[in-house]
Structure formats: structure tokens, C-alpha cells
Amino acid sequence: MLSALRTHPGCSEIDSTGTIEFLDIIIRAWTIINVKRPHDNVRLRDDRREVVRNANDIRLTELIEFADRVDAMQCRNGIKRYKSLTMDTGKAISHTMRGIVALVKHLLSTTHEYVLMGEFGTDPLEYAFNKLRQGCGGAYFISVVQALEKLCIQHTKLVLQYDIDFSSSLDHSCAGCQRPLTENENYVLDNLNVLEQGINEGTKMSLVYISGYIVHKEQERLRRVNGVEADNDNTRDGRVRNFRIL
């Protein structure tokens, strides 16, 4: 696109100097940031794609200058916006550039010999949240409680899948703990390992989900019994929505 603006005959009739200059800055900034392999600068013969090894690298200064130019645009919204970005876009670019530079300098001064800025991304986080959303019925907006419940289910599935043996001591005691067990309950506890081996993996996973659902419903019931009612203005289907994971 940049080459077309510079060389296409149809662009000679309009003044596109400012557009070309701005696009050139954006492409250069993206080239500096999008480095994911240590030797891309050699393979592509582009010094801008070299990994960052020094906190005083001139390319970091270029990113800060880019953020300064965006801040100087006086970004605004609406029909009065002329040769500037929207406010949200301007703030996002400025915060991202300054944040990346600060993170690179911190890593170089502490633990890293060099930094690949192309590895900075939210893809792993988005993948994790997608799994949480699918575990909550495919809803886009999920509550903090739902996310925590789903994470507990995932941890339990890993314990069952890899047959992890762990022990813990809990300082918990209540009336239910002191209740005498029936003969059938004693039999289940005494032969728990044998009974568990007779359950196939699919059934185990189903039991994990069923248990999570029962716990969730039991918590809602206890809240109603204890007189704790959610604010109708901030809830949907009885679930608190003050904090949303986007």
C-alpha cells in the first residue's frame, strides 16, 4: 500500500505526503516490534528486525517518539476529528508503545540477555478465556465466580487424568465432620480405590462436571437461606455481574 501511494500515477494528483509519512512510521514501528526469532535480521537482511540486547537501543527510542507523536495529535472523536486518530486508538497506541519499552528495559536489566518483542501477546490468555467461556455454556460475558469454578474443574480433571497422588491437612471441623457414617458409607470409603478403578475416564469427567454444578447450586441455595440476596441491577439470572471477564 505504501509503495502504491508513492508510485501509482493516480496518486500524483492528490497530496498524500502526510499519509505516506504516517504509514511509514507505523510500518517501521510494527517491524521493530514484530520480531519472533533471533536471526530474522540476517535472514531478511533488515537491521530493524534484530533482537533487542541493549536498554539504550535506538529502536526503543523510536517507539517512544512514535508514542509522543500520537499524543501530540490531540486525538478526538466525532466529526471534528481531522488528521488524527480517535481517542481510544491514540491512547491504546501510546500506552502499548510505552509499556513495551518499559517491559523490555526491565527484562534486560534483570534476567534476559535479549528480548523478542514479537513474543509479547495475548493469544495464550485469549485461548484460556475461550476455554472458560465454553465451559460456562458458550457465554461471552462470564462472572468471576464462574471462572473460578471452571478453573477448579480443570484442575480436578488434571488430577484425575495424571493420577496425581497428593495429601493435605485441613484444619476444618463442623457438625457434618462429626456425623457417624452409615455401613454403606464406610464400605465406600474403605474400598474407594477399588471402586474408582472400575469407573471409566469418560464417567469420571462427567462426575467432575456434575459435582461442579451441584456445588454451584448449593452455594446459591445457602446464600438464599442466609438472606444474602444479589442486587437486581447488577445481576443476571442471579449471578453477580459487577466484575466481568472480557
Image: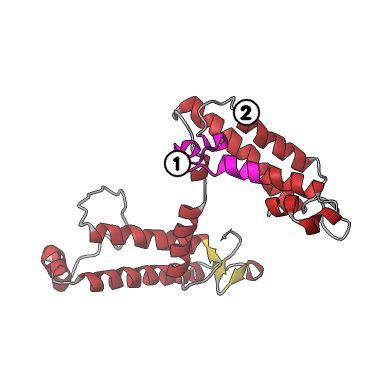
User: Which of the 4 image quadrants contains residue 105?
Assistant: top right
| Residue 184 placement (x, y as % from top left) | 15, 73
Q: Quadrant of the N terminus?
A: bottom right
Q: Distance between the residues labelled 2 and 1?
A: 20 Å
| Residue closer to the observer: 121 or 231 | 121
* 214 to the left or right of 18: left
**Residue at point 55%, 72% (across, down):** 238
Magenta segment: 27-50
Q: Name the residue under label 2.
A: 58
Q: Mark 1 points at which residue?
A: 37
User: Which of the 4 image quadrants contains residue 141?
Assistant: bottom right
Q: Is residue 29 magenta?
A: yes
Residue 181 visible in image: yes
Dot 1, how many residues are within 10 Å of its Cα: few (below 14), some (14-19), or many (20+)? some
| Residue 176 placement (x, y as % from top left) | 30, 63
The residue type indicated by label 1 comes to: Arg
In the drawing, what numbered circle is on residue 73? none
Instruction: Identify the mark nearer the N-term, 2 or 1.
Output: 1
Q: Quadrant of the C terminus?
A: bottom right
**Residue at point 53%, 30% (across, down):** 106
The residue type indicated by label 2 comes to: Ile
Dot 2, how many residues are within 10 Å of its Cα: few (below 14), some (14-19), or many (20+)? few
Q: Does the magenta stretch include residue 131?
A: no
> Is the residue 108 above or below the residue 192 in the image?
above
| Residue 208 placement (x, y as % from top left) | 31, 68
Secondary element type, mark 2: helix
**Residue at point 54%, 44% (across, down):** 34
